[in-house]
Amino acid sequence: VIDITKLYALGNVFTHDPGFTSTSACESEITFIDGDKGELLYRGYPIDQLAEKSHYLEVCFLLLYGHLPTAQELEDFEMRVTRHTMVHEQITKFFSGYRRDAHPMATMVGVVGALSAFYHDSLDINDPWQREVAAVRMIAKVPTITAMAYKYSIGQPFMYPKNSLDYASNFLYMCFAVPAEDYEVNPILARAMDRIFTLHADHEQNASTSTVRLAGSSGANPFACIAAGIACLWGPAHGGANQASLEMLREIGTVDRIPEYIARAKDKDDPFRLMGFGHRVYKNFDPRAKVMKESADEVLGLLGIENNETLKVAKELERIALEDEYFVSKKLYPNVDFYSGIILEAMGFPTSMFTPIFALSRTVGWISQWREMLADPAQKIGRPRQLYTGATRRDYIDVEDR
Ligand code: ACO
């Protein structure tokens, strides 16, 4: 690592690194990735151990505060989050301003940003108490907003949170319960949902997290910063890949059509890419994909739908790609999004909800990174330089002389 922070003091000297492939923008103690080994640690704890032994709200505490909570700390934290799951009643009116067929991500960008118009006691970023309340509010309210975005898109009434349920069960309840009918959350699905939240909770300086940090570096309020993160996550090269991946698997349809799609992915004249494959940092298996694959097997097995054609296509596609010279030489492996869609589909979510669920899960990562940035004495406004390639100085020409 070369520290070039003092380079600018030498005059107009800077590095040029499109896509930040070799540039670190901050110091962080939150998440560690070893892309060559395929290792992911939250505050030092391996992701597979957390996915197996912990649960999402405990992971939220860990990411936010840096240590695993004691039983008392966890109970207090869960109580604080639960107390904030409701949204201001006027927020429900925001939804009706959107078309019903709007993508739920479009709705979420707007509604999460609008929280700053309601919670005026969590906007002062210089007040540690307000920062703390903003963090807890966001973790508590984003699932409610995500479920409301879903309900709005299918024309059903909103379900208020049911605070006797755990975090993942409450989210499933708000999405799938309807007022006139009893609804029991399936514990298998709740556990799988919780694991999906955990696996997506943070991933150091990815595009959306960097967006949150950049927005926050100007002093913008936390709700505005998270809305910026949601907007960035939407892109198909980032969080939008889980939707794109399942749509691709469905389009392939049967295992005999896989070679055709592998050939397309290798053809440089065809813009097609295998969605859910490849990663900027992992040049080995994405450890989250391994857990997700096991989880897909488990969930579909327990639901009695293990002969699911999409899962068969996914496994066979993975097998063929991992033996193919093109994918091997470019170190392209399945990423977290490759199997998550299969589980979400089995739970009953439409593809349009996949990226909103990713946004919900990542909210804690964004907010943890935002807090860390504000606490860093070296923090300055983010302001990349550019390599100007436009015209040199020229004089204005009156329109009649052009
Ligand atoms: N299918 C086919 N070829 C691929 C794929 C793919 N999925 N991904 C990368 N490649 C090839 C590129 O064509 C390029 O080939 P070249 O060297 O011959 O030009 C090479 O591998 C390197 O690819 P880059 O795009 O330069 O790698 P980068 O690190 O910039 O991109 C990214 C990473 C965006 C994830 C890319 O692999 C991709 O588009 N994957 C599909 C989308 C996806 O699954 N995104 C989710 C990422 S994980 C997340 O955000 C949660």
Image (cartoon, helix red, strand yellow):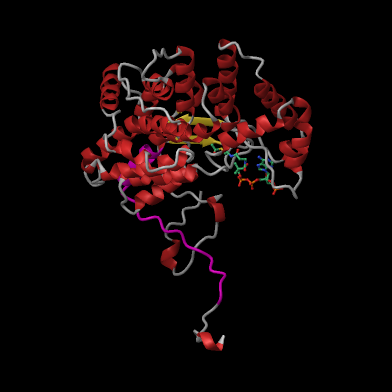
- Residue 212 in magenta stretch: no
Find the magenta span and give its range: 366-391
Chief SS of the magenta region:
loop
The quarter holding residue 117 reads top left
Q: Is residue 46 depicted above or below 125 in this figure?
A: above
249 left or right, relative to 258? left
Q: Which of 229 and 354 is in front in this view?
A: 354
Quadrant assignment for ligand 1: top right
Q: Residue at x 68, y 41 (%)?
A: 273
Left or right of residue 39, residue 64 in this image: left
37 on left or right of 367: right
Number of numbered discs on residues: 0
Q: Quadrant of residue 401?
A: bottom right
Q: Which residue is drawn at 36% across and 56% down?
A: 381
- Residue 357 position within the rendered picture, expressed as x and y whole percent measured from the top left: 46, 31
Instruction: Tell me residue 16's x, y (percent).
Output: 54, 60
Q: Is residue 204 visible?
A: no
Relative depth, front residue between 239 and 77: 239
Observer-nearest of 148 and 138: 148
**Whether residue 308 is situated above or below residue 88 in the rendered picture:** above
Using the rendered view, name the quadrant where residue 272 is placed. Answer: top right
Q: Is residue 236 above or below residue 3?
A: above
Work out which quarter of the rendered image holds the C terminus and state it. Answer: bottom right
Picture residue at 65% right of the left edge, 22% below the top = 311
